[in-house]
Image (spheres, rainbow, N blue to C red):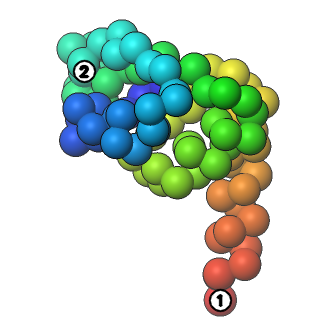
Amino acid sequence: MKVLPELTDKLSLYLGNEVKYDIIDRGSKDPLKWSEVNIIFENFWSARNIILSLGRAVEVLEHIVVRRTIIDFARQIVDLYQE
């Protein structure tokens, strides 16, 4: 997962104590300095809910099912609120 630099040092605040994570890279490979983070969620639903709550501050890179679900939920939200 990619995480905005402003969020990287506050991950435990946003993820909670039960979610385990490792910061793989603090933006040395990314021109916008996004960090690459490996996050271990308790389950699929927890992953989806937490990722959605973080909005544009995170990007799912792996686990295609989670990525597709985030895209689907985002489209549903846009459809609901679009005028």
Q: Depth check: give the residue in front, 66 or 42.
A: 42
Q: Which mark is residue 9?
A: none
Q: Which residue is identified by label 2?
A: 27
Q: Secondary structure at mark 1?
A: loop
Measuring from the top left, give residue 36's x and y in whole percent. Answer: 38, 20
In the picture, residue 9 is in which quadrant? top left
The reply to whether residue 67 is visible in this rendering is no
Residue at the image point whose x is 52% and y is 28% from the top: 19
In the picture, residue 12 is in which quadrant? top left
Q: How many numbered dots are placed on residues in this image?
A: 2
Q: Label 2: few (<14), some or many (≥20) within 10 Å?
A: some
- Name which residue type carries label 2: Gly
Residue 62 in the figure: left or right of residue 76: left
Residue at the image point whose x is 75% and y is 33% from the top: 44
Residue at the image point whose x is 68% and y is 68% from the top: 77
Q: Earlier in the sequence, mark 1 or mark 2?
A: 2
Residue at the image point whose x is 34% and y is 42% from the top: 13
Q: Tell me how far mark 1 sits from mark 2, CA to CA.
A: 37 Å
> Which residue of the protein is positioned furthest toward the top in this rendering?
24
Q: Is residue 28 above or below residue 77?
A: above
Location of the C terminus by quadrant is bottom right
